[in-house]
Amino acid sequence: MRIYMQRPETDQEPARFYQLILQPDLLGGATLIRQWGVLGQRGSHRKTPFASLDEAQQELELLRKRLQTQGYTTTFMQGLN
């Protein structure tokens, strides 16, 4: 699963992006990859492993909701089938 979110530019801050990528592994777990930063610049990233895919999906959903409260809107979403 991949979710790409953006927050528009304001008078105080430049436009920002946040990307959440969920990568299942061969052992039934998953890794949540977070990438964020200012649009047009090099961003930061963090990888967090989870023992189960369900656990990783729950964390992804919590992060997405938290980002929405901070003004980010989803511009692209690709799901797991």
Image (cartoon, grey):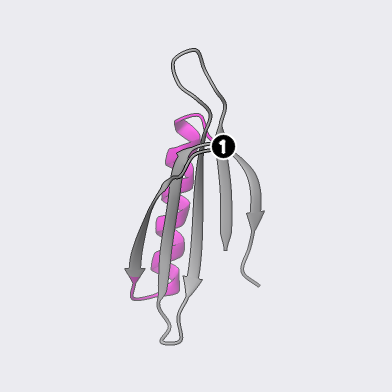
| Residue occupying the point 47% across, 53% down | 61
Residue placed under numbered mark 1 in the picture: 6
Q: Position of residue 34 (x, y in %)?
A: 42, 54
Q: Is residue 60 rendered to the left or right of residue 40? A: left
Q: Is residue 78 left or right of residue 34?
A: right
Query: Picture quarter containing residue 59?
Result: bottom left
21 or 57, nearer to the observer: 21
Q: Which residues are magenta?
A: 50-72
**Image point (43%, 83%), residue name:** 28
Kind of residue indicated by mark 1: Gln
Q: Tell which residue pokes out farthest to the top in this image.
A: 11
> How many numbered marks appear?
1
Question: Where's the C terminus, which quadrant?
Answer: bottom right
Q: Quadrant of residue 79?
A: bottom right
SS at circle 1: strand
**29 to 13, vertically: above or below:** below
Q: Is residue 51 magenta?
A: yes
Q: Is residue 38 above or below residue 11?
A: below
Query: Between residues 79 and 4, which one lies in front from this camera angle?
Result: 4
Is residue 48 in the magenta section?
no
On-image quarter of the N terminus: bottom right
Residue 43 rendering spot, x and y as whole percentages = 43, 45
Residue closest to the far bottom: 27
> Measured from the top left, where is residue 32 in percent x and y?
42, 63
- Crowding at dot 1, Cα within 10 Å, few <14 / some 14-19 / many 20+, comes out as many
* Image position, residue 71 (x, y; %): 50, 29
**Residue at the spot 53% in from the left edge and 29% down from the top edge:** 15
* Chief secondary structure of the magenta portion: helix
